[in-house]
Image (cartoon, grey):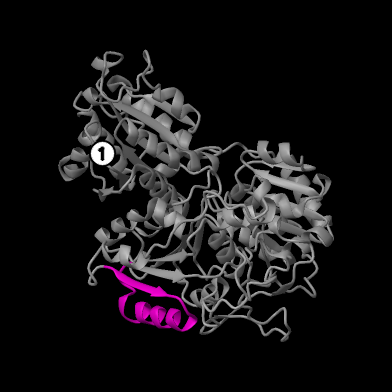
């Protein structure tokens, strides 16, 4: 069997389903084999022939983002590809995110022919002379990298996938010189794994450390679980939920894992982190005597609002304890897969049952929205209108339409912080955000990776700022091509909002390289598809937003859609590093049969809707 066909057969038989990428001279053999995959024999006789398709993305970083999101949401291996040169460099952007956030991705990268290494090949990356060294480049952002040789093909492919999915997961990179695709490879080994799941390896659990953790939880007066996205990718994520419910342990989640514990469960305290809920932070700081951090590295985005919580009152469960140990040195450390560890804790709970005293007097709270005056204008400026749409109003309305059993994908910046802070993840839904490398544009492409291949009726909503859409917005065209029911919501405020707020707060309002002229995103979107293939709307008032949402969900929810929000006023983002300790709060939205609604608030000057008078709207002189 030729190498390209052997690669496609392995991916297909493992049930990979999609290879995201842009074709080119040094990867086109791979795409040709995908095109012919029905004629490529199964690696094991009598098996089931599975679907495998290539997804043409608009940029290679979009391909890596899609593979990353698919791996996160499906708990599988994401696969992306690119040709050499600039394409390879673009792909690296997404792989850096997967590496930082421990997402299992396999990158297949074409290279110039081996025979031209160091001899003037176009896009040479052999590392000879002044050529880029692709192996060294990807060693910085992957768990495994190898330049493939035909006689080592099976061993290298197995090693790459095992590395990507085992211990602390992450990306693996395979480099394919153009002149090896049509070379013959040895027969498939007799012990070749038939399923991806069998290639996942985790460190053995130490029974003594599990026993120590169990006794610590049982003896604590107010233990609290803090769940990170490692729970979702564990071997048994349900074990974590079962233990929390059986022992009645309060639960908080990180921003990356906000959908990984039912948000409507009475045990759920809310989200912890820079955009987290102040009530959850207060509960941990003032009432928790044992914080069990499970599947999270407790990085600065998570721990900043919990500054001062001591490692002596903390336990950690993770396949890789290095990050949290360097940050806070928890008193109890259990190295192992979170699902396996909590399964062992459940077994102990059956033998020695206990229940944590119920939570009393807890109300989940959020920061009260307020307009932030960014640029001083004349108090008589007539351009301000009481009907202008505010970001917090838009999120409240949009929250009614977040799909159950669907996917929420968030891009970077103020809008992502606000959506996470003010809304919840509906039952059986997922929530995905890039907080590793944290690049703008991730959410636009990642929404496609989350939605593609979902059961009929599943929908996705993607929240992105105008900066993210300007960065990677043409990936929306992929959703149009594939007919994916994704609603892309664009927060259009003509700026990189978080940068502008920082410049306002910390740089004396010296705004630089963060604002730009107006862009009509609805008009841009209309160029990406006909009305029969893409719904487009633009709202500048709450009334317009309600109309557009009703129109889309009543008549066009089976199509991709782009909804532009024209935001003329900036609100203070609910981002803890920007806020004083006495920032006003209010109860969190609650879920009702018709969607979501805000709990009633006492009427006061600080709680009523405020359109800036262009004079001290931020409380500053």
| Left or right of 537 in this view: 254 | right
What are the residue bounds of the magenta stretch? 534-560
Is 157 covered by the magenta stretch? no
Q: Residue at x 80, y 54 (%)?
A: 290
Dividing the picture into quarters, in which one does residue 377 lie? bottom right
| Mark 1 residue crowding within 10 angstroms, few (<14) / some (14–19) / many (20+) | many
User: What percent of the width, then of the height, locates residue 576?
Assistant: 70, 58
User: What percent of the width, then of the height, locates residue 312?
Assistant: 83, 45
User: What percent of the width, then of the height, locates residue 121?
Assistant: 26, 20
Q: Residue at x 29, y 16 (%)?
A: 117
In front here: 567 or 230?
567
| Left or right of 216 in this view: 57 | left
Q: Quadrant of the C terminus?
A: bottom right
Q: Residue at x 38, y 38 (%)?
A: 90
Q: Quadrant of the N terminus?
A: top left
User: What percent of the width, then of the height, locates residue 429?
Assistant: 49, 65
Q: Residue at x 55, y 58 (%)?
A: 497
Check the image and report above or below for 256 versus 282.
Answer: above
Residue 97 visible in rendering: yes
| Left or right of 164 in this view: 318 | right
Question: What count of labels does the image hold?
Answer: 1
Is 543 covered by the magenta stretch? yes
Secondary structure under badge 1? helix
Q: Which residue is mark 1?
A: 9
Check the image and report above or below for 380 versus 377.
Answer: below
Dividing the picture into quarters, in which one does residue 207 lie? top right
Residue 260 visible in rendering: no
Check the image and report above or below for 260 versus 230.
Answer: below
Dividing the picture into quarters, in which one does residue 549 lie? bottom left
């Amino acid at each position: 069997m030729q190498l390209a066909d052997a690669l496609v057969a392995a991916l297909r038989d493992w049930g990979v389903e999609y290879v995201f990428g842009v074709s080119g001279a040094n990867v086109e053999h791979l795409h040709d084999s995908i095109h012919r995959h029905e004629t490529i024999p199964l690696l094991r006789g009598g098996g089931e022939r599975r679907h495998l398709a290539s997804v043409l993305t608009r940029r290679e970083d979009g391909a890596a983002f899609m593979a990353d999101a698919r791996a996160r949401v499906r708990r599988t291996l994401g696969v992306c590809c690119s040709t050499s040169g600039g394409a390879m460099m673009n792909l690296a952007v997404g792989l850096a995110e997967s590496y930082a956030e421990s997402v299992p991705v396999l990158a297949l990268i074409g290279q110039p022919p081996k025979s031209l290494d160091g001899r003037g090949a176009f896009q040479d990356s052999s590392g000879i002379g002044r050529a880029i060294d692709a192996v060294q480049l990807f060693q910085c952002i992957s768990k495994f990298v190898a330049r493939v040789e035909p006689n080592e093909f099976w061993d290298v492919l197995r090693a790459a996938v095992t590395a990507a999915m085992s211990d602390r997961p992450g990306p693996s990179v395979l480099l394919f010189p153009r002149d090896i695709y049509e070379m013959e490879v040895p027969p498939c080994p007799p012990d070749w794994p038939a399923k991806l799941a069998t290639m996942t390896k985790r460190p053995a659990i130490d029974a003594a450390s599990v026993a120590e953790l169990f006794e610590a939880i049982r003896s604590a007066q107010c233990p609290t679980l803090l769940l990170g996205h490692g729970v979702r990718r564990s071997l048994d994520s349900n074990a974590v939920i079962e233990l929390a419910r059986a022992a009645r342990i309060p639960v908080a989640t990180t921003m990356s894992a906000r959908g990984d514990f039912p948000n409507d469960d009475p045990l759920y305290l809310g989200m912890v982190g820079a955009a987290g809920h102040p009530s959850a932070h207060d509960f941990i700081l003032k009432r928790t005597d044992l914080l069990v951090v499970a599947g999270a590295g407790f990085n600065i985005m998570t721990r900043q609002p919990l500054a001062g919580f001591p490692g002596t009152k903390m336990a950690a469960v993770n396949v890789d304890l290095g990050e949290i140990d360097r940050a806070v040195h928890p008193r109890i450390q259990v190295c192992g897969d979170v699902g396996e560890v909590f399964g062992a804790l459940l077994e102990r709970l059956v033998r020695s049952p206990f229940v944590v005293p119920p939570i009393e007097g807890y109300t989940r709270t959020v920061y009260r929205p307020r307009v932030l005056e960014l640029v001083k204008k004349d108090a008589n400026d007539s351009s301000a209108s009481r009907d202008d749409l505010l970001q917090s109003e838009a999120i409240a309305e949009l929250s009614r339409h977040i799909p159950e059993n669907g996917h929420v994908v968030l891009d970077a910046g103020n809008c992502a912080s606000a959506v996470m802070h003010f809304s919840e993840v509906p039952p059986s839904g997922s929530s995905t955000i890039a907080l590793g490398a944290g690049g703008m544009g991730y959410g636009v492409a990642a929404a496609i990776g989350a939605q593609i291949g979902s059961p009929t009726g599943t929908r996705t909503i993607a929240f992105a700022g105008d900066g993210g859409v300007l960065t990677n917005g043409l990936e929306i065209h992929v959703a149009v091509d594939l007919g994916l029911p994704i609603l892309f919501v664009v927060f259009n405020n003509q700026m990189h909002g978080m940068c502008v707020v920082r410049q306002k707060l910390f740089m004396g309002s010296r705004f630089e390289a963060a604002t730009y002229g107006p862009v009509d995103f609805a008009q841009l979107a209309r160029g990406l598809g006909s009305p029969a293939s893409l719904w487009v709307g633009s709202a500048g008032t709450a009334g317009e937003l309600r109309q557009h949402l009703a129109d889309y969900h009543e008549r066009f929810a089976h199509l991709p859609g782009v909804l532009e929000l024209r935001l003329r006023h900036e609100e203070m983002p609910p981002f803890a590093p920007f806020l004083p300790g006495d920032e006003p709060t209010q109860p969190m939205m609650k879920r009702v049969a018709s969607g979501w609604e805000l709990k009633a608030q006492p009427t006061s000057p600080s709680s009523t809707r405020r359109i800036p008078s262009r004079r001290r709207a931020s409380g500053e002189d």
